[in-house]
Amino acid sequence: MFEIFQLYVFILAGFVGFIVIQRVPPLLHTPLMSATNAISGISLVGAIVAAGGSYGRLSTILGLIAVICAATNVVAGFLITDRMLAMFKGQKPGEGAHK
Amino acid sequence: MNGSSFSAFAALLPQEGLAAAPLGTRDLVIQATYLIAAVLFILGLRSLTRPTQARLGMQQAAFGMLFAVIGTLLNAHILTYQYIIIGLVVGAMIGYPMAMKVPMTAMPQFIAFSHAFGAIAATLVGVVEYRHAFTMRMDGTMPGMSSGVAAAIGFEVLFGALTVTGSFMAFGKLQELITGRPITFPGQNAFNITLIGVALLSLGVLIYNPDTSWAFYTIVGLGLFLGVSMVLPIGGGDMPVVISLLNSYAGLAASATGFAIGNNVLIIAGALEGAGGFILSIIMSKAMNRSFANIIFGAFGSAPAASGKAGGPAKEPKTISTEDAATQLAYAGSVVIIPGYGMAVAQAQHVCRELHELIEKKGGKVSYAIHPVAGRMPGHLNVILSEAGIDYGALLTDVDDANRVLQTADIAVIIGANDIVNPDAEDDKSSPLYGMPIFRPWTAKVSFVVKRGKGTGFSGVENPLFTKDNTFMLYGDAKGVLGNLVKEIKALDEGH
């Protein structure tokens, strides 16, 4: 039964994603991609449980690698997004001044 | 959310009895952090609709991530913290310098790399879960897994594995470790479709009978293989679509992980990335006037070499001296610069800003026409120019807007771009570019084309723009040519 609830969550989140992301201007498409990439580094949550659950040596090693990769993804993803967005901030407001 | 959603998480546990227990305070706290994280993620993406709010919004989203991680550390099923701490520290130590040092020109490679890392994590979590579900416990029982969870885990490792190798292949092509040209062999599409078919069959077997471990590992193996074989035939010019697709797959892998371990915030975050990647893929495909199928199965760059109009004496493009071009630029009222990936390759964005500032000082107005597929990923040229200090207000990111500005412009300067200004896209039905929305620099009074040599663009298609009456070529490395123009304009000032 819970799979059905999860499907609801997935579909609704997908809709929210479509509606919100469709309005992101082309100007910010690169930061958008790095932002969604950073956010989906939330796999870290699953990796943490896998690494800390003491499910045997091999599982712990795989879990550790998963934590390293996911943490890299999260840290690098949010930092690079911030670096890019800093370049678009504090300039003349209103994109497309020539429109 | 409810007690039953924990049964999947409980599949990771030594004791199965917990699943039916009502949520304790600790679990409520954990769920609260996940809820906060999910809301902050959505608000963060929403903030990206406005450049001025975007930074703050995404910083809040980063806090959301921190909340979710702290919440997860409270999880009662975590018995040892040492590996988690080691993993987090090592990950941060790899991620921090990478993110701070990477130049904006290398952003597509960086994103591909980051996709691969996220996907490795999702795939490994899937493998750990699967192994754990079919490991005999101390008391001689084995938890096993339901068909629903098996389906989720199957999708998780399929998309995960495919994204891992696909992203590394994309990284290799972008970094030019392997050729950017499509690599094809006869029967390639049939081969790939067969691979997909076998993977889906294995998935079916796994769902029907979750303890068929060969089916599980076949899916992992085929996923890894598919990532390579699907990216091989795709050319460098089609990279924006590939990166967007991998973005989407990485999201779907994360979402499937959420299904497998019964975690809503993973499902939500994955769905957001899946949607984002999908939207960007569509935008990129439209900007090239091609379908997904055509990009993935078409191997664009290899085929059209033979096409193009036959007959008619080939006209030689006209050249212009640097001095003449500089003089015209110095006295132009309105200049539109059309940059392509060639500008990034030549690292010409900084000298371009210098030129821009000189023209503005002389009273001219400068804007940039940025095509959706210019560069190697969506929006790539925008960040490259912004990094060089060019105000984003000067960037025209809509093709129609830019064409309107071009009609009244004195000079169009095309720097390292080719296909996005090819008139055949509008005039020649036999051209592989036909139907692609393009800029019309020939509607400006004159256009200057800064180009390395006389060759064709990435697609290998001839460009009749170069032989139009009001088009003049400036051959050479973009950085060098622009540098000379800057020098000449400065010399004009001194001469007066």
Image: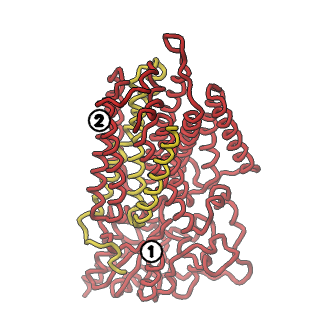
Chain colours: A yellow, B red
- Where B370 falls versus B489 (above or below)? above
Residue B340 image offset from top left, x and y in percent? 47, 67
Quadrant of the snapshot with the C terminus of chain B: bottom left
| Three-letter code for the amino acid on which mark 1 is drawn | Asp
Observer-nearest of B455 and B22:
B22
Residue B401 image offset from top left, x and y in percent? 44, 80
**Lateral position of residue A44 relative to residue B472, left or right:** left
> Residue B29 bears which disc, if any?
2
Give SS at disc 1: loop
Disc 1 versus disc 2: nearer the observer: 2
| Cα separation between marks 1 and 2 | 46 Å
- Where B6 falls versus A58 (above or below)? below
| Three-letter code for the amino acid on which mark 2 is drawn | Val
| Mark 1 or mark 2, earlier in chain | 2
Quadrant of the snapshot with the N terminus of chain B: top left
- Where B114 falls versus A53 (above or below)? below
At 41% from the left and 76% from the top, the residue drawn is B337
Q: Residues within 10 Å of mark 2 (few under 14, many from 20)?
A: some
Residue B37 image offset from top left, x and y in percent? 33, 45
Subunit bearing disc 1 = B
- Residue matched to label 1: B398
At 73% from the left and 44% from the top, the residue drawn is B194
Give SS at disc 2: helix
Q: Which corner quadrant of the image does residue A49 belong to? A: top left
The answer, for residue B434, to whether it is visible in the render is: yes
At 57% from the left and 47% from the top, the residue drawn is B178
